[in-house]
Image (cartoon, helix red, strand yellow):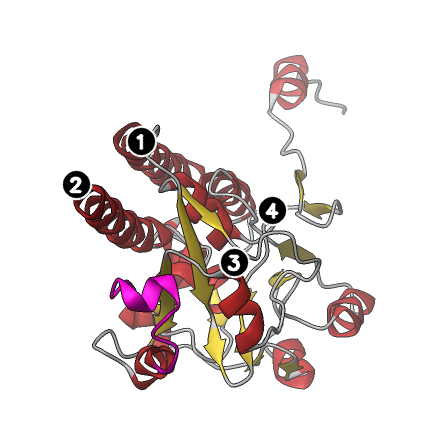
Amino acid sequence: MTVRCPGLLLLLLWLPVQADIRVVDDAGHEVVLARPAQRIVSLAPHITELLFATGAGAQLVGVSEFSDYPEAARAITRTGGGGALDLEAIIALRPDLVVAWQSGNPEAGIERLRTFGIPVFVSEPRRLDDVPDTLLRLGHLAGRGAEARAQATAFTQRQQQLVEQYSGQGMVRVFYQVWDQPLMTVNGDHLISDVIRLCGGSNVFSGLPALAPQINVEAVLVADPDVIVIGSDDTGRSAELQAWRQWPAMRAVARDQLHTIRRELLVRQSPRILDGAEQLCGVLAKVRSEQARSKK
């Protein structure tokens, strides 16, 4: 005897079908997941911070070296870092999503992971507006949409407050030192330059072609910036900063406009970059005040 259940058939037809999760990463690749990622590997410290900010910290099974924020990240399995990815360790973690850093991880390693069928999202924020956008996309992939939206909104509101506070200020010419040996800075496409612009500054090396170019002391002397800002692990009067006093005729040195900011607050493209932005904006405000006093 055949039992007909037309009501059950109608119910099945009306049940929602779970659609694939689809986002486009910063390299222009579409990343498709059948369900929210539960085993995520981060290949850069800023990515680790972004994922924790979305509420997906518990879904991280592997992180890169130097992923030290928040504190909980320190306890997660390491998978190499930068250009030295431990591909065997990553694959052994059986991730259902890897989040890579376009300018910091080797392209060959990223492609190798894809050959194993591992979905890879490539991150490369170049503007402050990219940070909340990245939060939203990662939150979508991790099934943390609500948390990601809250964090993205908070970031945008805080960013706008800084824009309102520092827009229309006098231009300050900035040399931002990433590293001392070799001497390195950033060009105009780097996120740090966007922070400098937010604060009413101008990066004296914005026109160089490389994202993080190596330069020499002579180039800095010719640029003659109003202020030198050094990303440093030592926020006191570091040796890197003191080295510039060998050139007392340079404007920044003559006016004692040599400053340090904690390196990680500006080089990591995470919500904490606004902490670095607040500090940098405060530095440039001091430079303007000194310039105004010297003209009286």
Q: What secondary structure is marked by label 2? A: loop
Residue 274 drawn at (x, y percent): 33, 48
Q: Mark 3 points at which residue?
A: 38
Q: What secondary structure is marked by label 3? A: loop
State which quadrant residue 59 falls in.
Answer: bottom left
- The residue sitting at 53% across, 77% down in the picture is 217
Cα–Cα gap, marks 2 and 3: 62 Å
Q: Mark 4 or 2 closer to N-term? A: 4
The N terminus lies in which quarter of the figure? top right
Q: Name the residue under label 2.
A: 296
Q: What secondary structure is marked by label 1? A: helix
Query: Is 224 or 259 nearer to us in this picture?
Result: 224
Per the rendered image, the range of residues in magenta is: 246-257
Mark 2 neighbour class, 10 Å CA radius: few under 14, some 14 to 19, many 20 or more: few
Q: Mark 2 or 3 closer to N-term? A: 3
Cα–Cα gap, marks 3 and 1: 30 Å
Going by the image, does 256 lie left or right of 109? Answer: left
Mark 3 neighbour class, 10 Å CA radius: few under 14, some 14 to 19, many 20 or more: some
Mark 4 neighbour class, 10 Å CA radius: few under 14, some 14 to 19, many 20 or more: some
Q: What secondary structure is marked by label 4? A: loop
Cα–Cα gap, marks 3 and 4: 9 Å
Cα–Cα gap, marks 1 and 2: 37 Å
Asked if residue 218 is positioned above or below residue 100 in the image, the reply reads below
Kindly indicate whether the residue at mark 4 contacts the one at mark 3 (C-beta within 8 angstroms): yes
Amino acid at the residue labelled 3: Gln
Going by the image, does 252 lie left or right of 32? Answer: left
Q: Mark 4 or 1 closer to N-term? A: 4
In the image, which is nearer the foreground, mark 3 or mark 1? 1
State which quadrant residue 90 falls in.
Answer: bottom right
Query: Is 248 or 162 nearer to us in this picture?
Result: 248
Q: Name the residue under label 4.
A: 35
